[in-house]
Structures are given as structure tokens and as C-alpha cells.
């Protein structure tokens, strides 16, 4: 069971992202404020959950949350400002959408660009330690997966329904065969060096 992060008289918001390591599609972040009595035995880092478990948890988190927000930054912006800055932007957008102002932001990872005048704390592997960050990881992952499934309908050859835009061998093999499309991140290494054709 994960811990519930508490500081006396403070509203705590967990923040996490999904899709940072992909070669296609957006980066998505979620911000979640949970009530003090929230608990669920399944809740964990979204990467440790099955798709079925994540989809079960999402409506439970959304209905129980005091507030939540989701921020999306597409691949074109990622290429313009780089993935780190795009991740910060997605996290800020998610926080913008909260209907309750938090006192402290708990960020999964080790870096963050301060948001307005709200205090923040970065926690490495925080999505496997605290409920608030785990809840954010579930929302970020499920919202992004949904988006990739919709984009799959436009470009089914890349099989985003399955790989969600991550650089699997099969995904890269299709990029090598067909080239990239408008949802690929052109500043990322779409092919491994051994896949490149030298003329």
C-alpha cells in the first residue's frame, strides 16, 4: 500500500506525466488533489498496473478527487521547445485546470520548473511511493493511451493502439519502411543507427 503524503493544514497535489520517452504523440500530465481519506488497494505507479486496472481506477480517482486537471502538449510543440520544457508545460497546464488551489505540488522525478508561487517538492519514483502522485500517473497514462488509440485510427500502420508511440522494434521497423508521419517527434531518434541507410 502506498503512503498518503501529508503536511498539516496543506492542500497537496500530486503531478506526473506520461509519454516522455515516446517517438510519436503528445506528452500528457495530470495533477490530482485527493481527499485525506482516499485509499484503494490497487493504486500504484501506472507502469506497474495492467490496462484493465488503470481503466478501473481512473473513474474512481476522478469521482473521489477534490480536484484534478490534465495538460496535453503535442509533438509539434515538443519539437519546438524540447521534451523537458514540454513536460513542464504539460504539468503547468494540468495545474492550471485545478478548481482548488494547492499549497504544495508533489512532482514525480527530480526536476520541475516552479509554478507561480506554489511550493513544490520533487520525488524520484514518487509514483511508487505516494498515492497523490500514483493517482496522477494513472490519469496521465489513461488519457494519453486514449489519445494514441484515436491517432491509431488515422495511421494504423504504426500500431499505436498497441505501442502507444513508444519506440518498439516493430514501431521503428514501420518508420524505416514507410517513413514518419505528422504525429512523430522529428527531433527524436526515430531510427536506431543500425537501421539507417547510408548512401
Image (cartoon, helix red, strand yellow):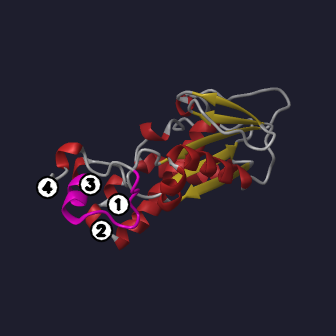
Please say whether residue 172 is one of the residues in the magenta stretch: yes
**Mark closest to the chain's N terminus, 1 or 3:** 1
Tell me, yes or no, if residue 139 can be seen here: no
Mark 1 — residue? Answer: 161
Q: How far apart are marks 1 and 3 (CA)?
A: 11 Å
**At 74% across and 28% down in the image, what residue appears?**
6
Residue 73 placement: quadrant: bottom right
Q: Is residue 102 left or right of residue 61?
A: right
Q: How far apart are marks 3 and 2 (CA)?
A: 11 Å
Residue 149: give x, y in percent of width and height. 40, 63
Q: In this view, does 109 lie to the left or right of 13?
A: left
The quadrant of the rendering that contains the N terminus is top right
Count residues near mark 4 (Cα–Cα under 10 Å), then give few for <14, some for 14-19, many for 20+: few
Residue 25: give x, y in percent of width and height. 44, 58
Q: Is the residue under label 1 in contact with that under label 2 (CB below 8 Å)?
A: yes
Task: Tell me the element at label 2.
Answer: helix
Does 134 appear above or below 199?
A: above
Amino acid at each position: 500500500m502506498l503512503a498518503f503524503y501529508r503536511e498539516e493544514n496543506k492542500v497537496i497535489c500530486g503531478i506526473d506525466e506520461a509519454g516522455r520517452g515516446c517517438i510519436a504523440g503528445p506528452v500528457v500530465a495530470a495533477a490530482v488533489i485527493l481527499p485525506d481519506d482516499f485509499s484503494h488497494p490497487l493504486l500504484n505507479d501506472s507502469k506497474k498496473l495492467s490496462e484493465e486496472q488503470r481503466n478501473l481506477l481512473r473513474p474512481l480517482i476522478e469521482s473521489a478527487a477534490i480536484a484534478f486537471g490534465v495538460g496535453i502538449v503535442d509533438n509539434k510543440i515538443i519539437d519546438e521547445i524540447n521534451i523537458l520544457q514540454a513536460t513542464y508545460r504539460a504539468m503547468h497546464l494540468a495545474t492550471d485546470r485545478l478548481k482548488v488551489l494547492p499549497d504544495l505540488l508533489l512532482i514525480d522525478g527530480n526536476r520541475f520548473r516552479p509554478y507561480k508561487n506554489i511550493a513544490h517538492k520533487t520525488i524520484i519514483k514518487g509514483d511508487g511511493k505516494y498515492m497523490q502522485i500514483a493517482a496522477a500517473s494513472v490519469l496521465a497514462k489513461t488519457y494519453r493511451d486514449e489519445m494514441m488509440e484515436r491517432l491509431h485510427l488515422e495511421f494504423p500502420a504504426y500500431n499505436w493502439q498497441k505501442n502507444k508511440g513508444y519506440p518498439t522494434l516493430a514501431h521503428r521497423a514501420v518508420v524505416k519502411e514507410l517513413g514518419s508521419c505528422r504525429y512523430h517527434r522529428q527531433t527524436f531518434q526515430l531510427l536506431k543507427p543500425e537501421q539507417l541507410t547510408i548512401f
